[in-house]
Structure formats: C-alpha cells, structure tokens
Amino acid sequence: MWQSGDAYEAYIGRWSRKIAETFVRQLDVPASRRWLDVGCGTGACTAAVLTAANPAEVVGADPSEGFLETARANVTDPRASFTLADAQELPFPDDRFDVVVSGLVLNFVPDPARAAAEIARVSAPGGLAAAYLWDLAEGMELIRRFWEAAGELDPVAALDEGRRYPLCRPEPLGRLWTEAGFTGVSVGEIKIPTVFRDFDDYWQPFLGAQGPAPAYLASLPEARRDQIRELLRGRLPTNPDGSIPLWASAWVVRGTA
C-alpha cells in the first residue's frame, strides 16, 4: 500500500508537510533535544522538526525502503538520520529519546498498542510522546468526499477509511496513549486548508495506487473509475478560478513518559 515515495508525495505528502509544521510548532519543545520520528515516511515530520524545533538530532524510522529513499533525498541536514524499522519493534535502547513523535501512521500499524508501548519504552523519563492521525471519518475532506462518491456506486466502498480505522478518533487515540503508560494525556485537533489548483490537481494523485483510496480505485474497471471521477467533478466545491477549496483535520495525542 505504501511503497512509492513519489506517488505518496503527490497524493498526501504536500498536506503531510503542512500539518507536520503546525504539529511540531504546537509541541513547543526546547532546542537541542533528541527526537525520534516513528513512521517517518518521506520525511515530512522530520523536516518540520529540523525547521521548527532546532533538535540535537532527529532519527526517522520507517518500514518502507521506498519511502526512506525519498526521505534521504529530501532531508539532507546532518542532524537527521533514517533507519529501516517497524514501529512495533523499534531498534533503539530504552530511554533513548527526549521526544518521540509519530505522524499519520499508527492506524496502519497492525498492532497500535504494541507500537505505543515501544514509543513509551524508547522515551526518556519525563520526555514527550505525541502522535497525530487524519480525521478520516469526517475531517479529511479530500479522502472522505472520494469515498462518499465511490460508496454510491459500489457497496464495497462503504467500508471506507473512516470505518476501517476507528483509531482516528479522539477517544481511542487518547486511550491508546493512556494504556501505554503515558501521563497527562490530552487530545487536540489541527485543521489546515487543502486547496487544489483545479480538478485534475485533485484527481490525478488518486491514480498513483498509494494508500487505501487510490489502491481501491486501481482495482476497478476503467468505466467505474470514470463514473467516480465524473461524480466527484460535479460535486466538489469550485471557486470561480477553478480551484477546489477543501479542509483537512487531524487528531493529536500527547503525553509524558
């Protein structure tokens, strides 16, 4: 599902970078801390840490070599390094990092509780651990509107990401952190605009087969793909200049190790 860094960048990467910047700034971590970015993908959050938090170091860990290749090409700061690793079995010693973050990934991990326990293990006592996930049920408009259109044409599409990933809600996300042993757990929201230049700018990234919605689309015959495309074309809000103004929101959990 997640292998090609370039396809991911076209689909979600540009919005991942925007929300990562807001996320890191809101954490308000002092400079010169040791950071770990779990599920770093193409390096959006790692880059945001370097820009906004002035870390002593930041390590990005991800199980996709394709994503890490893109991350290494995009992030060349010597304070950053990248490691092939599974969130459920992090290859780091106990208490290794002052700040551990994870962006837009825990809902895709087979055992999120195990990943949260690993995040707690590698967090230094008194350190900060935080994660964020798209609000796939309601707030991530570019994906939600796709599934609404697809669901009208195909009952299988009713099993959209909002239903498939119940972790992407405040209560289960907060509970995940509490059960991992973090204290002072809180859940908040980040909302960013996702404005597309025109309909093609919205639609073309869905053809890259990266992520649940594009992978579903790739599995359909061409006629059905065309139906979904035209249904969306007629429904998406459009400004006089042809741009498409949407919004994306994410839930953020944080706690102290």
Image (cartoon, rainbow, N blue to C red):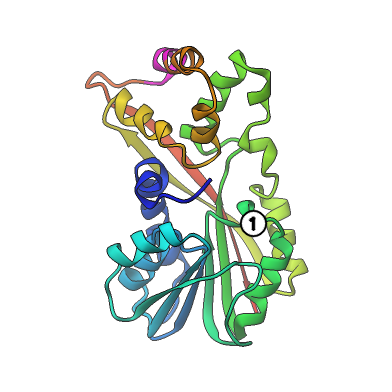
156 on left or right of 248: right
Q: Residue 81 occupies which quadrant of the picture? A: bottom left
| Rendering coords of residue 198 (x, y %) | 28, 26
Q: Residue 121 occupies which quadrant of the picture? A: bottom right
| Rendering coords of residue 115 (x, y %) | 66, 67
Q: Label 1's element?
A: loop
Q: Is residue 141 above or below residue 106?
A: above
| Rendering coords of residue 246 (x, y %) | 41, 32
Q: Is residue 183 above or below residue 194?
A: below
| Rendering coords of residue 211 (x, y %) | 51, 42
- Assess whether residue 235 is covered by the magenta stretch: yes
Residue span colored magenta? 230-237
Give the residue number, with chain letter if any, for mark 1. 109
What residue type is disc 1 on? Val
- Assess whether residue 120 is covered by the magenta stretch: no
Label 1, residues with CA under 10 Å away: few <14, some 14-19, many ≥20: some
For this orientation, the residue located farthest to the left is 241
- Counting labels gives 1
The residue sitting at 45% across, 59% down in the picture is 41
Along the line of sight, the residue nearer the viewer: 246 or 232: 232
- Give the overall secondary structure of the magenta segment: helix
Q: Is residue 51 above or below residue 66?
A: below
The residue sitting at 33% across, 72% down in the picture is 50
90 on left or right of 214: right
Task: Pick the quarter of the image with the C terminus.
Answer: bottom right
